[in-house]
């Protein structure tokens, strides 16, 4: 594979980071993101951008990284033995937003590219990424909008793409030890190399470019909704689930830590505050019960939303 293709992906990702930060900072209306550039001694580096104490976002980050080396960590080669003995490049942008208002959902996304090479052999490469939504007090119209934008981003690539990657997202962001989804899903894809490099790269761009269209309208609709101590306590309790997923199940966190990535950037996704309470259950008939009963499970959001309207 030509080095120009890796450069093309890197150029797109750096531009995506700029556009995400600009759109999110404008919506927040505060001081915006601060940036730290960092180097990885084994090869590569990145630039981390973090927002804290904003008017909308209590904490958030949009990180770019490009790491490379002569060998992969044991966890990667154990799962993919064909990668043993190959040099690698991993480049991507990841983002997470933790709003202060409990009525504004948390959201996460990333787009990434991986290539492993060995002299005399064909390179092994793939794209991955997606985005997902974690509301605490969900509104069906917001969830339908989120999935409609996700579906529209996938549509040019085939009618089966959104259903497959929506289902993959539901399965991936599932807390097995809690028997519940992390939120209402979205898109998740990995190991994507079907149809050639240009098609896969175009799909990655479609997903990355769709995020602000999916998320910002929800933020605008919910950012002024009144909230109090009860809603804040529930938000912090549910943020605990976010922490549990990232530290127990998330493959990206594990790969980043084992490959020598920058710990501060990898753990940027953690919320600024969270809480745990022993054996807590929501009150019957409460909005919190509505979340557990009707939102923390896979659903056909578009079919239900369109049938309702």
Image (spheres, rainbow, N blue to C red):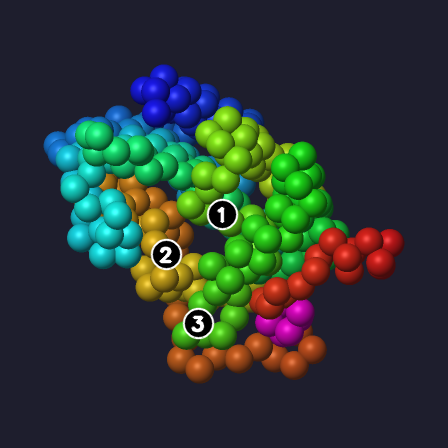
Q: Nearer the viewer, mark 1 or mark 3?
A: 1
Q: Nearer the viewer, mark 2 or mark 1?
A: 1
Residue 129: in magenta span:
no
What residue sits 78% from the left and 60% below the top? 304
Where residue 63 appears, as percent x and y from the top left, is 37, 34
User: Where does the magenta region start and end?
Assistant: 289-294
The residue tagged 3 is 176
Marks 2 and 3, how far apart at CA: 12 Å
Please indicate whether residue 80 sits to the left or right of residue 233 in the image: left
| Observer able to see residue 238 | no
User: Residue 173: which numbered mark, if any?
Assistant: none
Marks 1 and 3, how far apart at CA: 19 Å
The residue tagged 2 is 250
Does dot 3 land on a helix, a strand or a loop? loop
Residue 290: in magenta span:
yes
| Observer able to see residue 56 | yes
């Amino acid at each position: 594979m030509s080095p120009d293709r890796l450069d093309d992906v890197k150029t797109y990702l750096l531009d995506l980071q700029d556009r995400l930060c600009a759109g999110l900072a404008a919506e927040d209306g505060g001081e915006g993101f601060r940036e730290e550039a960092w180097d990885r001694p084994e090869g590569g580096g990145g630039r981390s951008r973090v927002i804290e104490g904003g008017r909308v976002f209590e904490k958030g980050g949009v990180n770019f990284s490009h790491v490379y080396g002569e060998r992969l960590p044991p966890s990667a080669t154990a799962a993919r033995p064909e990668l043993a003995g190959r040099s690698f490049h991993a480049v991507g942008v990841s983002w997470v937003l933790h709003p202060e208002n409990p009525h504004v959902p948390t959201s996460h996304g990333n787009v990434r590219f991986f290539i492993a090479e060995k002299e005399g052999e064909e390179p092994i490469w793939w794209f991955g990424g997606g985005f997902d939504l974690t509301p605490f007090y969900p509104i069906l119209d917001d969830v339908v909008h989120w999935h409609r934008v996700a579906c529209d981003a996938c549509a040019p690539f085939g009618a089966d793409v959104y259903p497959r990657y929506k289902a993959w997202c539901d399965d991936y962001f599932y807390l097995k030890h809690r028997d519940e989804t992390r939120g209402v899903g979205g898109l998740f894809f990995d190991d994507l190399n079907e149809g050639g490099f240009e098609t896969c790269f175009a799909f990655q761009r479609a997903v990355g470019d769709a995020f602000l269209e999916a998320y910002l309208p929800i933020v605008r609709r919910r950012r002024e909704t009144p909230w109090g101590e009860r809603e804040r306590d529930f938000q912090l309790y549910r943020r605990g689930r976010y922490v549990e997923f990232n530290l127990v199940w998330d493959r990206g966190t594990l790969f980043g830590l084992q490959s020598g990535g920058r710990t501060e950037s990898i753990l940027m996704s953690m919320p600024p505050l969270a809480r745990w309470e022993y054996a807590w259950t929501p009150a019957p008939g409460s909005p919190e019960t509505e979340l557990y009963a009707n939102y923390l499970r896979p659903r056909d959001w578009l079919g239900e939303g369109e049938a309702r309207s």
